[in-house]
Amino acid sequence: MNQFNTSIKRITALLTISLLNSLFLTAQQFGGNPASIKWKQINTDTVRVIFPAGLEKQAARVASITSALQSSTSRTIGSQFKKINLILQNQTTVANGYVGLAPFRSEFYMTPDPDNFSLGSLPWTDNLAIHEYRHVQQYNNFNKGLTKIFSFFAGEQGRALANAITVPDWFFEGDAVFQETLVSEQGRGRMASFMRDYKALWLQKKNYNWMKLRNGSLKSFVPDHYHTGYQLVAYGYEKYGNDFWKKVIDDAARFKGIFYSFNNSIARNSGKSYRQFRNDAIQYFKQLSFDAKKGDDNTKFITAAQKNNVVNYLFPYAEGDKMIALKRTYKNIPAFYTIDKSGEHRIRTKDIAIDDYFSYKNGKIIYAAYNNDARWTYRDYSDIRIVDVQTGSQIKLTHKTKYFAPDISADGSSVLAVNVTPDGKNEVHVLSAIDGSVKQVLNNTHQYFFTQTKFLPGNQYAVSAIRDQQGRMALVKLNLNNGETEAITPFTYNVLGYPVVKGDTVLFSRMENGADKLFAVRLSDKKIFQLTNNENAFYQPVINSKGDLIVSAFTADGSRLAKIDAANINWQEVNLADEKINDIYAANALNNSSAKLLDQIGARNFASSKYPKATRPFNFHSWRPYIAEPEYGLNFYGNNVLNTFQSNLYYIYNRDEQSHFVGFSELFGGFYPMLTAGVEGGFNRPYAVLFPNNTIEVHYFNSATLFTGVFLPLSFTNGRTYKDINVGVSYNLEQRAEAFPGKEIFKNKSFDFMRYIFSFSNVSQQAKQNIYPHWAQTLSVNYRDAITFQNSHKLVATGNLFFPGLAKNHSLVVNAAFQSRDTLMDFFTKTFPFSRGYEALNTRQMYKLGVNYHFTLAYPDWGFANLLYFTRIRANAFFDYTNAKAKYLQNQAAFNKSFKSAGGEIYFDTKWWNQLPVSIGVRYSHLLDNDLLNPGRKGLWEIILPLNILSN
């Protein structure tokens, strides 16, 4: 084996893995914050809260809540405890949080969700803490028994694998939702909007089997694992006590019974089979979800349900004899439409956005779109767009702002928007609709969190759905001159929102007795009326020119537009004062000693200090065997808490050569370009020497290798596409020295090469059923040059063009590739995508063209044994053409041949163990030319496996 070739390939592989890992981690926000951020910490016996300067109040609140939770609620999951690092991120507009292993850490994204019906109205810091800390308690108590063996052999990655095998995702999230419901006055378990998914199925008698409920569907609406999980977890606590799940999880984490340990543990501890347990749990919730008295049935649907599709019409507005709505389906990306007697007419595709909300007035649509920082992935924005309904044209009103829920005045001159600052402040801004300049910033003396806000007639006042500091909600009348507010509905924990102004009346949606129903408040006397008594969710009530009520009705076929005739609207005056949320489900379980714990947690003072960014830069958390015959080894992986350092330490043994390699690489993401560097030592490496008398001697040498590189990943999410650019360069040097006497035969040598990479992608939004986006372009260029060794070099470029096919979910994909290299032996990795079916050549110059047509065959929604589930079967018909050029060594004659193939592929999109999505394919390639390396081959069958199963 050529030693230089082996070394080059190993270093190239290490660089490739390093880069791929960095890009993978970028998706997980690796290197997402600039080095200029000043980090501080609050260190308690429960958590270390790490936060940017300015978030001291929020950090102290997190520390207080987590300490109280550890003392109070840990008893229902187990007694094991490990302190966690928790980072507060305040630069992003995305509301989220997570707890993860490898490394064990948590992050809170501190901008609240502006949609009241999504995650509720509790203070966002509290909501994150009570939900996410349950995941900390879970991970701390899932590391036992056989799971510890996984940890021993693979560190935290092994532990994460064991947890994924034994504990279903529905328990992780259902248990966390139960905790947020238990310790607060609200929580998703009490919210009607959280139960609407299953209620929609039950109302339409859609009785899906368990595997469909677990794995979802590409053709049907199916509630996710949060909703399913809460029902099963709450039922378990309610029927079998506070220790039920602790016993179940203890058995499962220990792999008691090895196979189906979680299911079998439920059977042991409940006295009924797993199937019976889950059926009983869902039936329990179903029976409690509907009043004995059936709700109103005066609704007439305007939009039709579609077979094998879920169609959502959201936030309708009525104007004359037409309606304006946002339409989003499993086949189509979100777009604004006008709907009238002649049909539906698309106005414009919506820009990429965090949520679906928009406002409309007098021919103008206004909404907030997502925009990100090119380099720092934790920093993004929410900017205002205004669309002209007549022309479909759009203006970008603001740039790099954090505005939500905008509304436009009737005369089109001013805009109202809610501004959320990085330090957690919430303000209403009045902007110019011409240039986006700030006309006025309204005082928020009560520290409310403003959500959907609308101009009232005259533009001197507005109405807003607000959350107070306890998490209660009300509609308030807002003075646009001085910021003073006046409540026009009582403050309660019943979620409300989506106000629509009609003269002196404000219509809105509000949670009431297990459903989100429609109400109205008259501004002149503050009288409140209940308009509907629907059994499931109605949103965005508007009144058309005939006095009919138009709503977006949540159903199992999507959110459908519906009408209630004016004569059937029930204007029933109601008194909402002092209303409390009744516990419809699991009332006993939600009344244990930890109930309403949040109310008992007062303000505490904590000392804060500087958090050094270089704290534990290596932090090795996982290790994994490396097997690539004839090489065997072990890799150790590390990430620091702030996720700016990524480390890899490895040992490799080559069985053929009996040689050894030890190496270390590091990636740093704290600067604008990412920096990577590494070293490797090779020992006892054989080198064959041929003497003039045709005798061969094997000598041994040691090697030292150094590589360093700079990579710049850039992302531009703006408008209707996602754009990414990655550029990089690396330098690689290998120095060799004779390990034993004989330097006169083998002289010390050094070899170095450069690598340059460039990639670009421009990808449109993609609907759920779309196999590929309808519009996308990708380009990748990789150039390597061995500077001091025989002037070896190689250029490989590949590109793809994606177009829509003949049907909504069909895709036409055109591939192209080009390779150019020197005429010497190729010392670099082969990456050229040769025509399918052939054993690939590697000549001086090659180019390829490919055409693919992808289409769906079926959506089976079928599986067996809770092991394998099929969501989609799809096919691809392809044609490849490759041209290869070279020169024969003997006579330097030109070599110029073409290699064509045609064939088909069938892919099975599946889920394994009800959690892991895997696509597996079968390909047949028919060769239209001779395969020079396999002369008798006419065709080839292949199994196509996903690379991500084995990749890092």
Image: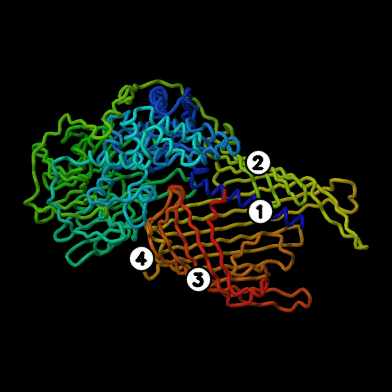
For residue 649, the mark is 2
- Mark closer to the chain start, 2 or 1: 1
Question: Mark 2 or mark 4: which comes first in sequence?
Answer: 2
Q: Position of residue 829 (x, y in %)?
A: 66, 59
Q: Which callout, 4 or 3, points to the residue nearer the camera?
A: 3
Q: Nearer the viewer, residue 812 or 474?
A: 812
* N-term mark: 1 or 4: 1
- Judged from this view, the residue extending furthest toward the right is 693
What's the residue at 55%, 74% (across, down)?
926
127 vs 384: above or below: above
Q: What residue would you read off at disc 3?
A: 878
Kind of residue at disc 4: Lys
Other-residue count near label 2 (Cα within 10 Å), few / some / many at <14 / 14–19 / ≥20: many
- Residue 12, numbered label: 1
Answer yes or no: is residue 115 visible.
Answer: yes
Query: Would residue 47 be found to the left or right of residue 570 on screen?
Result: right
Q: CA gap, disc 4 to disc 3?
A: 19 Å
Q: For the residues marked 3 and 2, what is the alpha-carbon distance in whole angstroms? A: 42 Å
Distance Cα–Cα, label 1 vs label 4: 41 Å
Residue flagged by tag 3: what amino acid is it? Phe
Percent position of residue 535, x then y: 18, 45
Please, what secondary structure does the residue beneath circle 1 have?
helix
Q: CA distance from mark 2 to mark 4?
A: 48 Å
* Quadrant for the N terminus in the image: bottom right
* Chain-order first, disc 4 or disc 3: 4
